[in-house]
Image (tube, rainbow, N blue to C red):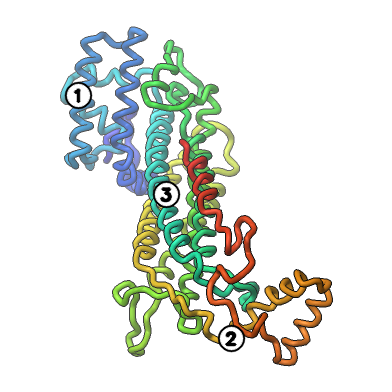
Amino acid sequence: MAETLWNKGKEATQMVEDFTVGNDRILDMRLAEYDVQGSMAHIKMLESIGLLSADELERLTAGLEQILGEIKEGNFALEDSVEDIHSQVELLLTRRLGEIGKKIHSGRSRNDQVLVDIKLFLKDEILKLKDRVLLLFDILQELSEKYRDVLLPGYTHGQVAMPSSFGLWFGAYAESLADDMYMLRGAYNVADQNPLGSAAGYGSSFPLDRKMTTELLGFGSMEYNSVAAQLSRGKSERAVASAIGAIALTLNKFASDCCMYMCPNYGFISFPDELTTGSSIMPHKKNPDVWEIMRGNCNRIMNAETEITMLCSNMPHGYHRDFQLLKDILFPKLELMHKCLAMAYYMLCNIRINENTLENHIYDYLFTVEEVNRRVLSGTPFRDAYKAVGIEVNNGTFRYGNGKNPEKAGDLRHTHIGSIGNLATESIREKMEEASRF
């Protein structure tokens, strides 16, 4: 049986305990460092309002610092008989320091303790994701500039449509990540509010200094209303799930592009053999397994927001044990998100571009719109030019301009902002810089 600090004389049966605790003890280990940080801020505040002496604060702080060191060195573990991380920290203090270890929980509930741990954890996770997104953004912009003049067929409805370029393609995903960064910033702002002092959801009769703990823990502000602090359980998680879902959608589309573009029928891009996989019976195969697994994992990540929404629905305000399952949903998805971002960066460092794609005559009709526009610029009304080019296509006599297709992006008259000839790379970078200011 797990050791519980709130035991009133009767223990749950093992079957009930196993069912209700689930994976929580394992997931709690990711919160260990943050639980100690929360306790260190809390005891400083307790001393400031007279609930701890200066000597007790000094001894408790030293004890917590010792535990924090053990966590960082990998020498900390939840004992089999202990239910959660909060209990483990308090029990260690009590064993090592005696009765004063029992004083650290004054003015707290596990409810606000868990909230603090999760919010501190999520803030750190968001900042780590921010760094990974910026790395991916940088290489996409680098590739966009490197291949700005290399033409690429654009498709709509899966059909050859209009000329694009590798510069435009890479740059599009860079800017999409800037949009995703705004989502991350929003999630950070939701998490960056201190719930400590809300206790079980209705405050405390102790004269807690919540402004002090807000500053000590580095929160931007606090959740003022004690009930509102508890209502935020699930809201921070959902905000983060929504943000990583946006990043996952960007990666999902890019992965789908890569799967298609690697196919020999397209042949726009390739990767070294060691980054692809083969077939058990077909010697020629070079499968895009990395991108397929990434696409699948990104779908799983996007589902986290829906799961969290459904889990948190239909409950009145206040704490409910259902909330424990939030960690089961979100924590593994955060880990997946880190892996997907790292792998996308690795693959892009090794991407190879086919610079001669448009030599294939199946792309001749890619330039029908260019020809229509060329004639319009020469004075032909648009509808007349459109009809004439359409007839030439139907007759099989269509040729662009002087009969020679453009060889590079610079040969096309695309000069407006965000077009083939004006990628607005610097403007997109400024957008990302603004989005990532948090």
Looking at the rendered structure, the secondary structure element under dot 3 is helix
Residue 356 screen position, x and y as percent: 47, 79
Q: Mark 2 points at which residue?
A: 362
Q: Who's the residue at 53% across and 80% down the image?
A: 358
Residue at point 78% right, 77% down? Answer: 386
Q: As shown in the figure, which amino acid type bears the numbered disc 3?
A: Leu
- Crowdedness near tag 3: few (<14), some (14–19) or many (≥20) residues, C-alpha within 10 Å: some
How would you rate the neighbour count of disc 1 (Cα within 10 Å): few for under 14, some for 14-19, many for 20 or more? many
Dot label at residue 63: 1
Q: What residue type is labelled 2?
A: Ile
Looking at marks 1 and 2 on the same chain, the residue that comes earlier in the sequence is marked by 1
Q: Residue 39 carries which label?
A: none
Of badges 2 and 3, nearer the viewer stands 2
Please tell me which residue lies in front, 37 or 129: 129
Quarter of the figure with residue 342:
bottom left
Marks 2/3: CA–CA distance: 37 Å
Decide which of 61, 326 is in the foreground and name it. Answer: 61
Q: Give the numbered dot on residue 134.
A: 3
